[in-house]
């Protein structure tokens, strides 16, 4: 056994994160990344959100409410499941953090509940959100219905097509789904449109962003609400194994399930962290587009949708369209904190291509009786690659960020079954 | 030939006239067409011209300008060609570059601003760059005498107004309403007027976002604006005249709209001249421009007049 050091165990939301008092022009910086690159119209709204968050994140009543909904509405805590067949096959202990069992079928609800409660306390009447895979849109639709918000979700037209079961789900819960036809008609374009809506309706609307991206304070808020994943996993693994895992693996689109798992382990120096991006058809480019979504691995520094981070861009600074079999990872940017952690070496950025992810999708289904989301399949694909090289150590926690029901159509189509 | 923004406004003020600021996307429909388009706007009466540098993800723009940016990119527009094109424009109005921050960041703010100056650009507007993140750009603007133009929105609270004004140069860009760019014919809302009334500065005040008709332009100048900014209305004309065979028709229509808008602005100036009360008598009316008080905050002005 490798003896990983154990820092103070953390309990569930007795606190979300430490307060910081930002100075002018330093708000939400992670090294050189982060910041607030948004139209002036939105600056007061970001300030209002930051104030509300600073107030409620340590308010016992708020945290009680949050825990209540996470448990009773969301179904937390989720199991840390020992995948015995995968473990046997790969020759190391594999634990799956079962975010696929959260209500709605993905980790996205953790953040949606938190932000919806904040929005309620701020007196907002309307929620807007973007969605790629439709999982965040679904989570937003669920809290919208439950808490009585008018809810609008923007979704790239291409994603509407490849994830249409989620469109029905959102509509059933009373959410208006607006297809977006600009750009590559995927997640980035949906974010642009959600931002435009927010700029127009900022007075009564909360933008419920779905990942650790965008302008400060969003990356911090979403990370904190998703940290419940890592807090639980850390406690669970200590209970089961009496030690910390050697490695953590999570897929990264914007990076929320990755940051959620990683964050509570950051101080555990011996725990390695792997953020797996979508390698698409391989790390290559056409003139206007990347054939992948690997902004951490091969992106360059830039400013996109509110934050300075790593992005896919051409030689002039135009944002490249991205590509992935999984709609939730198909994004040209990545959260600023993850960009920073990857640059400092604390998190290792890696990728799996479409084919590898598909293979992992089938493998988990057959070996463990669990159908993973195509997004999460990227984490599983990297597990497979890295297990062979031995870099993962003897025990690993993989974030199974979502379930694959939404992907059945796409997968069957690829298999020539429809 | 570079014309400075401050000089232009001073000259207009002498004449008692408001300014028309026309926006078009450089490279729409083609880079070759842009110089003719700009000249047509100036012939019609545009006093300043904003040239958009197209960006792939323009979050502050509505469908009209998004589409224009798409056409310009399709036609091969990029920052290098943009600067060449601007340097070759021979017009005697101030030119302003409007673009998104990633293009500037990627070029390097220092190099970008220097290139602006060398190409004859006298101001820069970056709609996704609030003052908090603008340090590098404003420093470069200071070094190269390019005005950093900032926006103030109806949602901007008083303390932010002060902060924005302390960084701003050229003119101050007041948003007539919340939302993205796009023509909204109809009456100018109360929010534009309220904003004009509450922003106290000696920089010229230009109102934009949604302004498209001569009536609106006239109303805004009457309400105290020094300039109106019209973009989508011009871009709409370009959008519906894309045929290279019909460039003359396009120029004619652009010139006609500029003339119409400028006439509205002149009407307001005439009317304002008749109705402006004597200095210091009616501080609520923004028409009342006591220049000596312009650089103080509104609160100070009201105190001065014994209102508070
Ligand atoms: C199941 C699942 N995992 C992962 C992601 C990627 O998002 P993030 O990187 O923010 O976790 C998504 C996004 O839609 C998702 O649905």
Image (tube, rainbow, N blue to C red):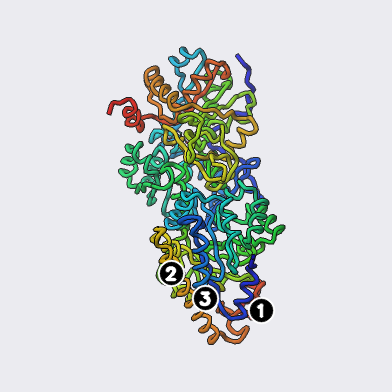
B34 relative position to A146: left or right: right
State how far apart marks 2 and 3 are (Cα): 25 Å
Q: Is residue A391 above or below residue A204?
A: above
Between disc 3 and disc 1, the foreground one is 3
Disc 1 element:
helix
Mark 3 or mark 1: which comes first in sequence?
3
Label 2 in the same subunit as label 3:
yes
Chain under disc 2: B
Residue corresponding to mark 2: B252
State how far apart marks 2 and 1 are (Cα): 50 Å
Which class describes the residues within 10 Å of circle 2: few (<14), some (14-19), or many (20+)? Answer: some
Q: Residue at the location (51% across, 79% down)?
A: B266
Which class describes the residues within 10 Å of circle 3: few (<14), some (14-19), or many (20+)? Answer: many
Q: Is residue B146 visible?
A: yes
Q: Find residue A366 and name its label.
A: none
Q: Residue at the location (49% across, 14% down)?
A: A90
| Nearest the eye: B90 or B16 | B90
Residue corresponding to mark 1: B304
Chain under disc 3: B
- Estimate the x, y position of residue A71 in percent, counting from the top left: 43, 35
Between disc 2 and disc 3, the foreground one is 2
Residue corresponding to mark 3: B221
Which quadrant holds residue A70?
top left
Chain under disc 1: B
């Amino acid at each position: 056994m490798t003896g990983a050091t154990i820092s103070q165990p953390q309990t569930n939301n007795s606190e979300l994160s430490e307060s910081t008092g930002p100075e002018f022009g330093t708000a939400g910086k992670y090294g050189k990344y982060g910041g607030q690159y948004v139209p002036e119209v939105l600056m007061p709204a970001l300030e209002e959100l930051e104030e509300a968050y600073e107030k409620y994140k340590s308010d016992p009543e708020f945290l009680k409410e949050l825990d209540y909904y996470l448990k009773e509405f969301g179904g937390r805590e989720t199991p840390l499941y020992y995948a015995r067949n995968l473990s046997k096959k790969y020759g190391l202990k594999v634990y799956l953090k079962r975010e696929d069992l959260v209500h709605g079928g993905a980790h996205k609800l953790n953040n949606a509940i938190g932000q919806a409660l904040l929005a309620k306390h701020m007196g907002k009447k309307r929620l807007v959100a973007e969605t790629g895979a439709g999982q965040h849109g679904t989570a937003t639709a669920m809290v919208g219905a439950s808490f009585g918000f008018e809810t609008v979700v923007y979704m790239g037209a291409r994603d509407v097509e490849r994830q249409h079961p989620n469109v029905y789900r959102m509509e059933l819960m009373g959410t208006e789904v607006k297809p977006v036809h600009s750009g590559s008609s995927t997640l980035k374009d949906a974010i642009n449109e959600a931002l435009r809506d927010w700029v127009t309706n900022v007075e009564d609307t909360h933008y419920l962003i779905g990942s650790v991206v965008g302008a400060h304070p969003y990356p911090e808020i979403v990370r904190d609400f998703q940290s419940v994943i890592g807090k639980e996993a850390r406690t669970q693994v200590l209970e089961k194994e009496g030690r910390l895992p050697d490695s953590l693996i999570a897929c990264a689109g914007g990076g929320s399930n990755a940051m959620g798992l990683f964050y509570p382990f950051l101080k555990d120096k011996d725990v390695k962290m792997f953020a797996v991006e979508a390698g698409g058809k391989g790390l290559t480019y056409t003139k206007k587009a990347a054939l992948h979504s690997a902004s951490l691995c091969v992106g360059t520094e830039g400013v996109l949708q509110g934050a300075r981070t790593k992005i896919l861009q051409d030689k002039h600074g135009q944002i490249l369209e991205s590509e992935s079999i999984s709609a939730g990872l198909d994004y040209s940017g990545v959260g600023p904190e993850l960009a920073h952690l990857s640059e400092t070496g604390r998190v290792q950025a890696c990728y799996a291509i479409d084919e590898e992810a598909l293979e992992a999708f089938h493998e988990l289904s057959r070996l463990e009786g669990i159908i993973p989301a195509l997004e999460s399949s990227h984490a599983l694909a990297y597990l497979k690659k890295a297990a062979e090289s031995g870099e993962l150590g003897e025990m690993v926690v993989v974030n199974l960020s979502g379930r694959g029901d939404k992907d059945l159509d796409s997968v069957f189509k690829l298999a020539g079954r429809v | 030939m570079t014309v400075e923004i401050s000089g232009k406004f001073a000259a207009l003020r002498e004449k008692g006239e408001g300014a028309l600021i026309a926006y078009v996307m450089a490279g729409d429909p083609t880079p070759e067409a842009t110089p003719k388009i700009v000249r047509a706007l100036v012939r019609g009466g545009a006093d300043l011209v904003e040239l958009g540098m197209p960006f792939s993800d323009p979050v502050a723009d509505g469908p009209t300008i998004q589409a224009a940016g798409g056409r310009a990119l399709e036609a091969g527009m990029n920052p290098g060609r943009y600067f060449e094109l601007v340097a070759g424009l021979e017009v005697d109005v101030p030119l302003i570059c409007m673009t998104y921050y990633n293009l500037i960041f990627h070029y390097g703010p220092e190099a970008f601003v220097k290139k602006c100056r060398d190409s004859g650009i006298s101001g820069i507007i970056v709609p996704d760059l609030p003052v908090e993140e603008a340090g590098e750009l404003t420093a470069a603007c200071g070094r190269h005498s390019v005005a950093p133009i900032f926006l103030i929105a109806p949602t901007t609270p008083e303390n932010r107004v002060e902060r924005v004004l302390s960084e701003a140069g050229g003119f101050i860009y007041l948003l007539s309403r919340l939302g993205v760019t796009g023509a909204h014919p109809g009456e100018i809302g109360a929010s534009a007027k309220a904003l004009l009334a509450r922003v106290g500065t000696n920089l010229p005040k230009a109102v934009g976002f949604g302004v498209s008709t001569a009536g609106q332009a006239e109303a805004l100048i009457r309400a105290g604006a020094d300039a109106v900014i019209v973009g989508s209305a011009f871009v709409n004309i370009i959008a519906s005249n894309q045929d290279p065979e019909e460039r003359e028709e396009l120029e004619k229509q652009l010139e006609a709209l500029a003339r119409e808008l400028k006439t509205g602005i002149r009407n307001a100036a005439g009317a304002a001249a008749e109705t402006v009360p004597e200095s210091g008598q009616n501080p609520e009316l923004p028409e009342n421009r006591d220049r000596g008080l312009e650089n103080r905050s509104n609160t100070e002005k009201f105190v001065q007049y014994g209102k508070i």
